[in-house]
Image (cartoon, helix red, strand yellow):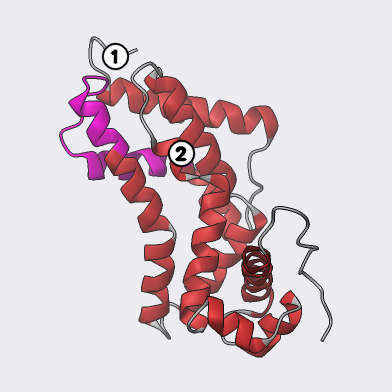
Amino acid sequence: MPNKVLPPSGPGRPKDLVKRKAILEAAKSLFLSRGYDGSSMDVIAAEAGVSKLTVYSHFTDKETLFAEAVKSKCEEQLPELLFELNDDAPMDQVLLGIGRGFNALINSRESVELHRVMVSLAAQDSKLSRLFYEAGPQRVLNGMEALLRRADQHGKLRVSNPLSAADHFFCLIKGGANFRLLIGCGDAPQGDAAEAHVRDAVSVFLRAFRTDQAS
């Protein structure tokens, strides 16, 4: 069997974790290039350079693997650490960090292709759509909701409805550019343009929810 993805384990890298990462990388690549239906566990195993049994030992079924692949992609750009609230951290810096990560995530080639795959499957498999939403967008939204609730409790922001505010924040970051990118009518903002967009979105958000004492 060809070993296309599996890297050398190296010192201090447990073999099981290396294989799991290789499987996830293969799954992300194949789900995007071949779609969900076109990516069998046999093909994913071959792409990862492991046996089919190994794939099933790490991930119970293809649905579980798909959900974990989506979660892994989100965690690359938005690790849970970003949603922690340090008492000494200015809110604008916290929000800028999240905004930059989210902006990079939604405008990445992998994310755009995955969204297109999900739209194409929307009328066929609602269960798969739920798996995608819960593993990716819902996880990110929940993390932001929890952060905004803590910010309100600590007097850093005034947020009466943290879930709604979290939704507003991510919509501001998406803007119109992400929709144009999804339908092939524009390019993702890069470099200074991307930074200016995120800063503008954070500024608007803070004007809506800042308290007199917020820093």
Residue 151 x/y as whole percent: 27, 27
Q: Amino acid at mark 2?
A: Leu
Question: Could you tell whether 78 is left or right of 35 in the image?
Answer: left
Badge 2 element: helix
Residue 53 x/y as whole percent: 61, 88
Q: Residues within 10 Å of mark 2 (few under 14, many from 20)?
A: few
Queried whether the magenta region covers residue 162, the answer comes back as: yes
Q: Earlier in the sequence, mark 2 or mark 1?
A: 2
Single out the residue that lies furthest toward the left.
Answer: 160
Residue 120 in view here? no
Q: Give the label, 2 or 1, closer to the camera.
A: 2
Between the residue at mark 2 and the residue at mark 1, the CA separation in whole angstroms equals: 21 Å
Asked where in the image residue 163 lies, by quadrant, the reply is top left
> Which residue does the image show at 56% across and 46% down from the upper left?
77
Q: Which residues are magenta?
A: 147-173
> Which residue does the image show at 59% across and 28% down from the upper left?
195
Q: Which residue is mark 1?
A: 214
Q: In the rendered image of this protein, does residue 118 appear above or below residue 177?
A: below
Queried whether the magenta region covers residue 170, the answer comes back as: yes
Residue 6 x/y as whole percent: 76, 69
Who is closer to the viewer here, 149 or 170? 149
SS assignment for the magenta stretch, majority: helix
Q: Which residue is mark 2?
A: 81
Who is closer to the viewer here, 15 or 100? 15
Badge 1 element: loop
